[in-house]
Image (cartoon, rainbow, N blue to C red):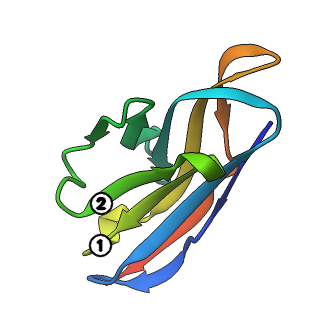
Amino acid sequence: VHLVESGGGLVQAGRSLRLSCAASGIIFSINAMGWYRQAPGNQRELVAGIISGGGTNYADSVKGRFTISRDNAKNTVYLEMNSLKPEDTAVYYCNGRLVTDWGDRDYWGQGTQVTVSS
């Protein structure tokens, strides 16, 4: 089972980016998926999450600017990031709580860099 992120890059403050994360492999079900980020010198933090029932939660710092969504048919989760700020600069990691042959466990993507210039 793999999680593969895409969509990172370098943008100016105030612009938008859309991240995608596709889960592949033998997946029986997806309990939750989310996006975390880690800036240099900081701990990894939750940015946004979405559970199987569709409920979402966001870090206070991104509420109103970021939107998490998913396509169940594609086992893909998205993070639409608007009004980006330099403090959003970080490596963004996709996380999935998946039920697979190995049971119910967490999986992580390799990370994608988001850099916001002022």
Residue 99 is tagged as none
User: Around disc 1, counting alpha carbons within 10 Å, would you say few (fewer than 14), some (14 to 19), or many (20 or more)?
Assistant: some
Residue at 43% x, 75% y: name it. Answer: 17
Position of residue 60 in the picture relative to residue 56 (left or right): left
> Mark 1 to mark 2: distance in Å?
6 Å
Image spot of residue 12 (x, y percent): 37, 87
Please state if 46 lies on the left or on the right of 73 as rendered: left
Q: Earlier in the sequence, mark 1 or mark 2?
A: 2
Quarter of the image containing the C terminus? Answer: bottom left
Label 1: state its secondary structure. loop
Disc 1 marks a residue whose amino acid type is Asn
- Whether 71 is drawn above or below 102: the answer is below
Residue 91 appears at what percent x and percent y?
A: 54, 57
Q: Is residue 56 above or below residue 41?
A: above
Numbered mark located on residue 66 in the image? 2
For image coordinates 39% across by 39% down, the residue present is 49
Query: In screen coordinates, is 79 left or right of 118?
Result: right
> Residue 67: image x %, image y %?
32, 57
* Residue placed furthest toward the top: 103
Q: Nearer the viewer, residue 19 or 31?
A: 31
Q: Residues at badges 1 and 2 in contact (C-beta under 8 Å)?
A: yes
Q: Which residue is mark 1?
A: 82
**Amino acid at pointer 2:** Phe
Where is residue 73 drawn, in percent x and y? 61, 49
Crowding near pointer 2: few (<14 within 10 Å), some, many (20+)? many
Which quadrant of the structure image shows residue 105? top right
Q: Residue at point 30% right, 60% down?
A: 66
